[in-house]
Image (cartoon, rainbow, N blue to C red):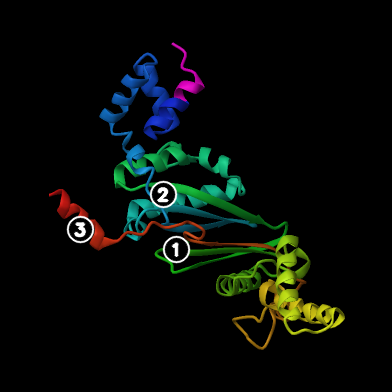
Amino acid sequence: MSISASQVKELRDVTGAGMMDCKAALTETAGDVEAAVDWLRKKGLSKAAKKSGRTAAEGLVGVSSKGTSAALVEVNSETDFVARNDQFQALVRQIADLAVDAGGDFDKLGAAVVASTGKSVTESITDAVATIGENMRLRRTAAVTVEAGVVGTYTHNSVSDGLGKIGVIVGLQSTGDTAALALLGRQIAMHIAAATPIAVRPDEVDASVLEREKAIFADQARQSGKPEAVIEKMVEGRIRKFYEEATLLKQVFVVNPDLTVEAALKAAEKDVGAPVTVTAFVRFVLGEGIEKETSDFAAEVAAAAGKA
């Protein structure tokens, strides 16, 4: 019989199992959803549903590069313990490798086939949930490509090559020496990990962010009671300082504090043998923006004692 997409979706919502597993279950049970749920449970494929409500804010950031492209992925788990699991690390590494070809497209990456499992990334993660016993998810991905040059990479708090808690990729457009560019790219990526810039150059700062900073600086300046013309000049000065602190090229280079990143790039052109332009960067920090669950251990013990 023909199994509809709506039936597959219904079963996925109920069980959390992979799309192909749901389709197989419905085929085996002639489209009976309740029977399909039991079929998945017997196969151990619906365990993920029990885990899916748990907060997954740990895990790993994976970095991979190929030619003139590189990509980042964040794959979350519930505990840091799982991040040290060899099976989980191997899966994240394979997903990061696939992410380079996916070019930052989340849906394309989710559908890409993991060689070791023969299943999609989404389905492979669901299977890993059932095997390892924690909620996991592919949270995000991003990629950077240059026409010529290198994409520098760096992982911080690494647990293994290309896997850590902070990941950075940065594009260096240049026709110069690749080896020299690779070294420079790593240094710039390390700087980005430490200095957290929000844009490459001042004219790339998001307009809403800039307006918010101007409003804050203006309010602070007005508290001095100075005339509006003076306040305007004060705000201009604060914005220049903001650019120096928040944009990559204007920041003081952490590798050589005597230079800005912009000056360091210019100085490096002698070794590289050609002009170097930073095209873009992406910085992932594991779990950033996820509201982690907190628990009162004493209250939990008291509650458990009350139930005993």
Q: Which of pointers 1 and 2 lies earlier in the amino acid sequence?
A: 2
Q: x and y percent of residue 109 in the render?
A: 54, 43
Q: What residue is shown with label 1? A: 161
Res. 174 visible in picture = no
| Circle 3 crowding by C-alpha within 10 Å: few under 14, some 14–19, many from 20 | few
Q: CA distance from mark 3 to mark 1?
A: 40 Å
Q: Amino acid at mark 2?
A: Leu
Q: What residue is shown with label 2? A: 91
Q: x and y percent of residue 115 in the render?
A: 44, 41
Foreground of the two, 67 or 224: 224
Which of the 4 image quarters holds residue 182? bottom right
- Up the image or down, 14 lies above or below 233; here it is above
Q: With 227 as the anchor, is 111 left or right in this view? A: left
Q: Which of pointers 3 and 1 lies earlier in the amino acid sequence?
A: 1
Which residue sits at x=71%, y=66%? 212
Q: What residue is shown with label 3? A: 301
Q: x and y percent of residue 57 in the render?
A: 42, 56
Foreground of the two, 170 or 215: 215
Q: Amino acid at mark 3?
A: Val
Mark 3 against mark 2, which lies toward the viewer? 3
Q: Amino acid at mark 1?
A: Asp
Q: CA distance from mark 3 to mark 2?
A: 36 Å
Provide the residue span drawn in magenta.
Answer: 1-8
Residue at the left extreme, as displayed: 308
- Up the image or down, 205 lies above or below 22; here it is below
Q: How many marks?
A: 3
- Helix, strand or loop at mark 3: helix
Which of the 4 image quarters holds residue 119? top left
| Circle 1 crowding by C-alpha within 10 Å: few under 14, some 14–19, many from 20 | few
| Circle 2 crowding by C-alpha within 10 Å: few under 14, some 14–19, many from 20 | many
